[in-house]
Structures are given as structure tokens and as C-alpha cells.
Amino acid sequence: MKVFAIPVYYKSNLIQRIKKLREDKDPRKKDYSSTKLDFGPVIFYLGRHFGFCYGVENAIEISYKAIAENPGKRIFLLSEMIHNPGVNADLISRGVKFIMETSGTQIIDWKELNPDDVIIVPAFGTTVEIQNKISEIGINTIEYDTTCPFVEKVWNKAATLGKSDYTIVVHGKHKHEETRATFSHSKEKAPTVIVRDAEETKLLCDIICGTRSFEEFYTLFEGKHSYGFDPSKHLSKIGVVNQTTMLATETQSIADCLKIAMIKKYGEENIKEHFADTRDTLCYATHDNQSATYALLEQNADLAVVVGGYNSSNTSHIVELCEEKLNTYFISSAEKILSKNFISHYDFHNHKEVKTENFLPEKKVVKIILTSGASCPDAIVEAVMLKILSFYEGIKSVDEVLN
């Protein structure tokens, strides 16, 4: 396994030690059960998989390499490299400037850039249109391209399907950087439409089966389909790919729903001619983190704390899963734990931060699920753990807990 060169201040000796113990016992990562850390008054259940994934570590390594290799040059990121405020703030402090907001809104005009500038492509990838724009300026688009290989795998799958005359259905948030990039690359090779969730998928199924008219497609999927998309032609042969950070179970459910619609229209005996099997596009890290979260929820915990950037899609899905069972607090750092009685956490449903009183129950032993998203440094998870432990007396040492 490749070891990436990432800044030491993103790492945690404690978390690294815990992960190493699990890896030694389960090198093939087949055991998704949680790690129990019994500190006495507080028991933490850590996810088997959490924190930086391959794609994020790769992006961080390339970004800091770009800074080190280009002293005196202007260095730009297309947008947030990953959805973690601490990492992005650190890059900004080193002189890196963002060209766009995560929504795609331009911050720096393309006319202000010149061929001597350096541009870092974020882990989400970028659109074909932006790639062409950078090339026109005369800037190398490949040297510091941090696009996650699993995102590129989705693009390659879409291209392969397009060569066989399949239309691509992208499961994703159409305003998210990764989905915008995937849509852009996909529509170069095949007619493409984006569905956000089961509700939008049902609408598309209705159009496929004829219970809604083809004309309705353009209203229901305005801004979410490729130019020249003709539902009367392009919904007869489809394949599903996804924004890699979406819920794997939701992507599978969407694919199953569309497959049923195609069977209704064309018959089960003909399904292979009309529907492609694309299960191999699911990101391993997304799958592992979500599977580990399901295993965490088997514990009889009092609450869950999920750490990550508030605009992180994969983190918000972990929060969603935890919320189904118990009180869940979505925080970006240990500083959000204001005291033993107060926590400031993010309500991603309503897109605002809220404060909750008495989030830690008055019990002899408090049991807490603790995990994080794929773009959250282990050092922040450790800081959260230590902050909570600081509120209690009689805490066991780390060596006692791990031995």
C-alpha cells in the first residue's frame, strides 16, 4: 500500500496506533466491527474505517508538493481541494488562492491568470470546459491534477457505456463539484441525466414507463440533462454511475428502481440489452466508511459525534445514518465542544449551526460513537476525543485502554 507524504500535523499518534492494531488483526479489512475504547467514565466506539481515504491523501500530497516546487510562483486551486475547512485554510495561509467557490461561482477572472501560474485541480476533478479554459491560458492541466482515481474510474465507465450507445444516469447532487465534473465528462461520450434521489428516480421511471409524458422530462430535469437529450430515444438503454460520496445503498436502490422500470417496458428476457450492470463504480472508501457506520450503530451508545467539513457529502451521509438511531452531533473541530454542557453542531438539513445543552448525559458511564468523514484529519478526531475526556475524572491512560 502506498504511503503518502502528508503534513505531520494532520496525523495522530493515538489514532494511527488504533488503526494499526486493527490492521494487524484484519489486514484484508473484512471485519467492520467497531473498536471499543473503555476509558472508564467514557467508552468510545470508533469506526473500523474513517478519516483520510486514498484520494484525499493523494490530493494533499500533490498540493503541498506544488507549493514546495514552485517558490515565488502564484499558485491557484480551482476550488476547495477537499471539503475540510482546516486543510483549505492551511493552503490559503501558504499563499494558495481559490479561483472558484465550491458552487462554481467565479472568484478570480480567468483573464487574471497567465502561463507562468500554477493551477491545482481538486480531488473532485473538474469539467472538460474548465480543462480547455486552463489549456487555452497555457497552463499545464496535468502536472498538479489531484483528481481521485475512483472519480476517474466513474468517468471511464461512463465513456465505455457511451461507446455501446448507453445513456448515462448519474446519481449525485447536480451542484456538487464532483457531479458537475462527472456530468461534463459523461456528456462528451453519451446522453446524460442527473438524478438526486429516489424521488427524482421515480419521476424518471414514470417517463420511461409512459405514465408521464416525454415533454414533462424537460421541466422535471431542467438543468440536469445534456444538450440535445431526447427522452423518446435516450431512455431505451441506460446505465447508472454515481457521485462517489453518495450513499452506496441509495445508488443501488436507484439502479434497482430503474432496472425494474426497464423490465416493465422491455421484458426481463431483454433486460441485458437495455440496462447495464455498473456496480463496480462504487468507491471502496465510501463503501468501507458506510459499512463501518452500520457496524457502529449495532452498539448500544448514548450519542454519536461525527467529525468533518460541513459541506462534505460523504460526512453528511454518515450523519444521516447515525441520526436514524440516536442523537448525533456533526462538528468540524474540537472547538465546537464548548463545555461539558454545550456543543455547537451543524444541522445539515437546515444548513445552519445550532447549540445543544446537556448533550452528554449524566450517567456513570457515557457511551459515544465517534467517527469522521473521508476528508477529516485524524488529528481532529483525536482532539475531539481528548476534549470530551477532559470533562471527566478517573480516566484510564491510553496504554491501559489499548493493552
Image: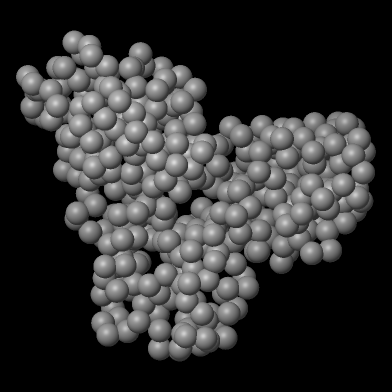
Image quarter of residue 180: bottom right
Residue 336 x/y as whole percent: 28, 40
Instruction: Give how far across and how far down residue 290 sits, in percent.
Output: 46, 33
Q: Residue at x 26, y 75 (%)?
A: 68
Image location of residue 9, percent across then percent down: 19, 54
Q: Is residue 349 above or below residue 295?
A: below
- The total of numbered circles placed on residues is 0
- State the colouring used for the structure image: one colour
Q: Residue at x 26, y 30 (%)?
A: 342
Residue 269 against residue 5 in the figure, above or below: above
Towards the viewer: 266 or 75: 75
Residue depicted at 79% across the width and 64% down the height: 227
Quarter of the figure that contains the C terminus:
top left
Nearest the viewer among 326 and 34 is: 326
How far across and how far down the image is residue 81, in percent? Answer: 41, 61
Residue 180 seen in this snapshot: yes
Splitting the image into 4 quarters, where does residue 181 fall?
Answer: bottom right
| 38 versus 316 height, above or below | above
Q: Residue furthest top?
A: 364
274 or 398, nearer to the observer: 398
Q: Is 343 situated above or below 204?
A: above
Left or right of 333? Residue 258 is right
Lateral position of residue 22 relative to residue 56, left or right: left
In screen coordinates, is 11 left or right of 161? left
Is 270 placed left or right of 248 in the picture? right
Q: Is residue 164 visible?
A: no
Question: Which residue: 66% across, 43% down?
Answer: 196
Return the residue nearer the eye: 381 or 125.
381
